[in-house]
Image (spheres, rainbow, N blue to C red):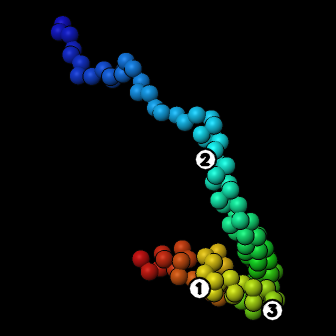
Amino acid sequence: MTQSTSNVIPFPIPRTLPMTKTRSLQARAAAFAAAVASAGEHSALSDDHAVHVAAVVRASIRFARRKGVCLDSLPPQLRIWLLELCNQGDPTCRMVRDWLAGNRRFCVSLMKETV
């Protein structure tokens, strides 16, 4: 009988691992403090805006589920807030507005029909 030869090449294992430079704890803490200080004012404003957008979107979806999926099913003030946020360019509100307006171009059922 002949011995079978193998063409398996052993995986190379490095003898020494490369040393990565790690910043000291004080340097990381200073960088974090600087980032928090520079973003302090902006984050408070953006947090309020995000909370407002979330409240408008949540209420719009609730009214649409209860009263029908159309823009007229929203109360007037909620509709004004939604459309103002859309005019400001908020992508979440624009998507909800398109859903309420009946924009079905991204629906799966329509995509299957066109293919």
Q: Is residue 109 left or right of residue 40?
A: left
Q: Can you name the residue that lies furthest to the top here?
A: 1
Residue at 63% x, 83% y is 88
Residue at 71% x, 89% y is 71
Nearer the viewer's eye, disc 1 or disc 2?
Answer: 2
Indicate the quadrant where residue 81 lies: bottom right
Which kind of residue does numbered mark 3 sit on?
A: Pro
**Which residue was labeled with disc 2?**
31
Which kind of residue does numbered mark 2 sit on?
A: Ala
Mark nearer the N terminus (3 vs 1): 3
Secondary structure beneath disc 3?
A: helix
Q: Relative to 38, is 51 above or below?
A: below
Q: Are marks 1 and 2 in contact (CB under 8 Å)?
A: no
**Which residue was labeled with disc 1?**
103
Residue at 54% x, 74% y is 108
Q: Are marks 2 and 3 in contact (CB under 8 Å)?
A: no
Nearer the viewer's eye, disc 3 or disc 1?
Answer: 3
Which kind of residue does numbered mark 1 sit on?
A: Asn
Can residue 101 be seen at all in this image of the molecule? Answer: yes
Nearer the viewer's eye, disc 2 or disc 3?
Answer: 2
Q: Is residue 44 left or right of residue 7?
A: right
Q: Position of residue 8 (x, y in %)?
A: 27, 22
Q: Position of residue 19 (x, y in %)?
A: 44, 27
Query: Which numbered disc covers residue 76?
Result: 3
Mark nearer the N terminus (1 vs 2): 2
